[in-house]
Image (cartoon, rainbow, N blue to C red):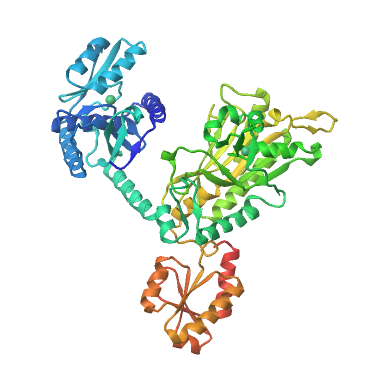
Amino acid sequence: MSTKINQKNLQQKKDLKEVKKVKAKQKEKNTVSIETKRHSLSHLLAYAVKELWPQAKLSIGPAIDVGFYYDIDFGERKISDADLKMIEKKMVYLIKQNLSFERSEQKIAEAISAEQKIGEIYKAELISDLAAGGETIVSYYTVGKFKDLCRGPHVANTNQIKAGSFKLNKLAGAYWRGDEKNKMLTRIYGLAFETREELNDYLKMIAEAEKRDHRKIGKEQNLFMIHEYAPGIPFFLPKGMIILQELLKFTRKYSYDDGYQEVRTPQLLNAELWKTSGHWEHYQEDMFILHQADGHDLGIKPMNCPAHMLVFKRDPHSYRDLPIRLAETTTLYRNEKSGELLGLVRVRSLSQDDTHIFVRPDQILSEIAILLEKVKKIYQIFNLQIDKIYLSTRPEKFMGEKKAWDQAEANLKTALENAKLNYEINAGDGAFYGPKIDINVKDAIGRQWQLATIQLDFQLPKRFDLHYIDQHGQKQTPIVIHRALLGSLERFMGVIIEHYAGAFPVWLSPVQVKVISVAEAHISAAQELSQELKTAGLRVELDAENETVGNKIRKAINEKVPYMLVIGDQEIASPILNVRDRGAQKTRKITRDKFIAEALKKIENHQ
Ligand SMILES: [Zn+2]
Ligand SMILES: [Zn+2]
């Protein structure tokens, strides 16, 4: 029982969404969706469990992202990984019996008492909820000898599930209804795909992801640490700080450029500001608030937007001044739930390559076009492939005029098309204050990460009563574009640690060159070389420890340093260096000057 899960609302919402998705898909084509197979497997999991332990009490068993789970009360019995194997074997046996799923109905009062009679207290509670919601009849599905409360849909017959396409993979603890006051049940997770091959590919990907886990690499390479005194707020160690600083430099060069103006706004701002921006009403739960004795509460900023509105408002603006691009990378704090924190990728403190661009309506198209070109260039440098782009459009409840929305959405589409970027439309999924573009990338092992967001905002400038004077001398409200292309730098660092598996390109490597002395007699020459390389602008570490060369080389290989230079008798006698490149089996010969020029060129080109 390693993980405790407490995500009641989230899970319920997800389950609902899942059901809707499944139904929509079923309608679309008359085939069995993978969600249906996953959900059917959860019934078979419960069936197998009841065959093995008739006393076990069942609760809920939905399909999830890559499989399914079932929450079960095993009483005193502790379920082990060996038990999982046994349950899985039983499931395979049941599936081979070519069992069909049969639907039946029962009056709700009868169903409750029937469940109570056989001790299925959780099911009885679930049905009581349905009764309280006004339902009078519940549906059951029977497969083989096992009957379970369910709305469906399922596979018609277990022969629709391919052999080897699923696997029980994980045990966790989960409170009944996600409430820690309730009993902790055992959650059994399964993975399920269409075929055995797909499952195997997924397992391979997971194993690779584990090797690349940024928390593991961060520890091995001394990049960052997380302490219990500051959950979700990483400490960047000297080597991690170098990467963070490089990302900041990168941000200033590529994410911003000379058209951007960097500002620094307060970390602590009066509650009145957050009331004006709407955060007090809609975002307070995610904020850290300081209650002052004089009654003037302060909020630690979770976003830069409201402060940037104040900066814009300070001066009068003409239509000729726009666009105005205010950029800021100071740290923001968000009170994420402790259960959701994860290394660098889900944190409570973050610094973004954040910018607010104040534009006239006729500038949206050109501004978005510039941003999309930046996005393409940035991800190309990191070798991250743009995977999916989503354009979220006007929701049912929206603010502003329909005409302005139509115009803005048309501009976003045109900009995406002109940039030759494929996108999907999430109709009605935009925020009430404006449409947005989300950009997902694929990393080296095919995982998707959502990084850039470009969000239009008709509302905030109105709330702050911002104006510019148009060519007719009339007051007009600007539109704001919120944009972050790398997103949070902390999260981006987590993503690229995994993307590169810790073998950073030269420009990002905390240590670019490792100089290794063979013996005592070579230390001063190694020191001299290190100094020369440092002066040239390279990050160098000297290993002059009293260890064998073999050990020192192995250490440098583990640290994934791009270049290794061993200094022994031969190297002292000659002006030529023996370079061992990361990943290479053999060394190569090169003059000092040429080596320095080569390394500096890589750094300059972000390689
Ligand atoms: Zn079902
Ligand atoms: Zn913003």
Is residue 566 visible to us here? yes
Question: For this rendering, which residue is in front, 74 or 214?
Answer: 74
Check the image and report above or below for 576 versus 344. Answer: below
Question: For this rendering, which residue is in front, 512 or 182?
Answer: 182
Is residue 459 visible to us here? no
Quarter of the image with the C terminus in it: bottom right
- Residue 95 percent coordinates (x, y): 18, 33
In the displayed structure image, the side of residue 460 where residue 171 appears, left or right: left
- Give the residue at the far bottom of this rendering: 573
Check the image and report above or below for 360 versus 558. Answer: above
- Residue 205 percent coordinates (x, y): 35, 50
Quarter holding residue 293: top right
Q: Quadrant of ligand 2?
A: top right
| Residue in the image at 53% along x and 45% along y | 349
Question: For this rendering, which residue is in front, 379 or 298?
Answer: 298
Quarter of the image with the N terminus in it: top left
- Give the residue at the far front of this rendering: 293
| Residue in the image at 33% along x and 41% along y | 3
